[in-house]
Image (spheres, rainbow, N blue to C red):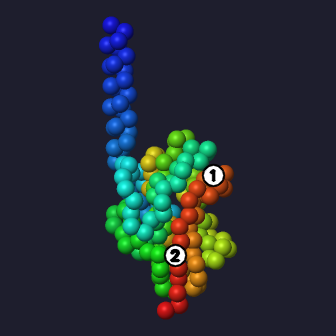
């Protein structure tokens, strides 16, 4: 009887984990430097072309599953990843986050040639969770997007080169 109960509990936990991982996404809203949008998302496998490689999990329990700078979104998914852009282009910094700590906060830090231009605070309200910020590339140079945890630790970074032509 004890073995049967343990098996039933294990099966129930497995089913509950699968149901939580398949939670539906909430609607999101676009953002531009200082405004943000976020939605929970079922876990997606693989890496998008032009996206940053997966990072190791830091001690904070927050992990960046994917990070990409792209031209836009289709629904809540990144479209047309970019590594180069033209002056005046508007891009989306898109990240998928996993948190072992439940709800937390991250920051999208936009930098131009190593100098911080904008910090965009973003709430993470599920796991995994996708969130994004928008940036108009107002100057030529090397733009980078960093994802920071709530302690200010850089979790992952990707970049785009911006030319005047």
What residue do we see at 48% from left, 63% from top?
A: 52
User: Residue 146 at x, y = what percent?
Assistant: 58, 64
Q: Nearer the viewer, residue 65 or 42?
A: 65
Q: Is residue 114 above or below residue 101?
A: below
What residue do we see at 44% from left, 48% from top?
A: 128
What residue do we see at 34% from left, 19% from top?
A: 7
User: Residue 25 at x, y = what percent?
Assistant: 37, 51
Q: Is residue 117 visible?
A: no
Q: Secondary structure at mark 2?
A: strand
Residues at marks 2 and 1, CA–CA distance in whole angstroms: 24 Å
Label 2 vs label 1, nearer the camera: 2
Label 2 Cα neighbours within 10 Å, binned few <14 / some 14-19 / many ≥20: many
Q: Nearer the viewer, residue 88 or 84?
A: 84
What residue do we see at 36% from left, 69% from top?
A: 79
Tell me whether circle 2 and circle 1 mark residues in contact (CB < 8 Å). no
Q: Nearer the viewer, residue 7 or 24?
A: 7
Q: Which mark is residue 150?
A: 1
Q: Nearer the viewer, residue 154 or 121?
A: 154
Q: Which residue lies most toward the top here?
A: 1
* First-in-chain label (2 vs 1): 1
Within the image, what quadrant is residue 21 found in?
A: top left
Label 1 Cα neighbours within 10 Å, binned few <14 / some 14-19 / many ≥20: some
User: Residue 138 at x, y = what percent?
Assistant: 56, 83
In the displayed structure image, the side of residue 79 where residue 143 appears, left or right: right
Q: Which mark is residue 53?
A: none
Q: Badge 2 is on which residue?
A: 160
Q: Secondary structure at mark 1?
A: loop
User: Residue 12 at x, y = what percent?
Assistant: 34, 26
Q: Is residue 49 above or below residue 85?
A: above
* Numbered-mark total: 2
């Amino acid at each position: 009887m004890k073995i049967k109960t343990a098996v039933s509990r294990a099966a129930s936990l497995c089913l509950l984990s699968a149901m939580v991982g398949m939670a539906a996404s909430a609607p999101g809203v676009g953002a531009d430097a200082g405004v943000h949008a976020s939605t929970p998302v079922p876990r997606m496998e693989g890496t998008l072309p032009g996206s940053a490689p997966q990072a190791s999990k830091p001690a904070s329990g927050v992990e960046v599953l994917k990070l990409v700078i792209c031209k836009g979104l289709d629904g809540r998914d990144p479209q047309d990843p970019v590594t180069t852009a033209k002056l005046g282009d508007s891009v989306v910094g898109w990240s998928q986050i996993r948190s072992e700590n439940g709800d937390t906060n991250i920051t999208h830090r936009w930098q131009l040639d190593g100098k911080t231009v904008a910090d965009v605070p973003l709430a993470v309200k599920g796991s995994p969770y996708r969130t994004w910020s928008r940036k108009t590339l107002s100057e030529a140079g090397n733009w980078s997007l960093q994802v920071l945890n709530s302690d200010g630790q850089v979790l992952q970074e990707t970049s785009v080169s911006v030319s005047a032509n």
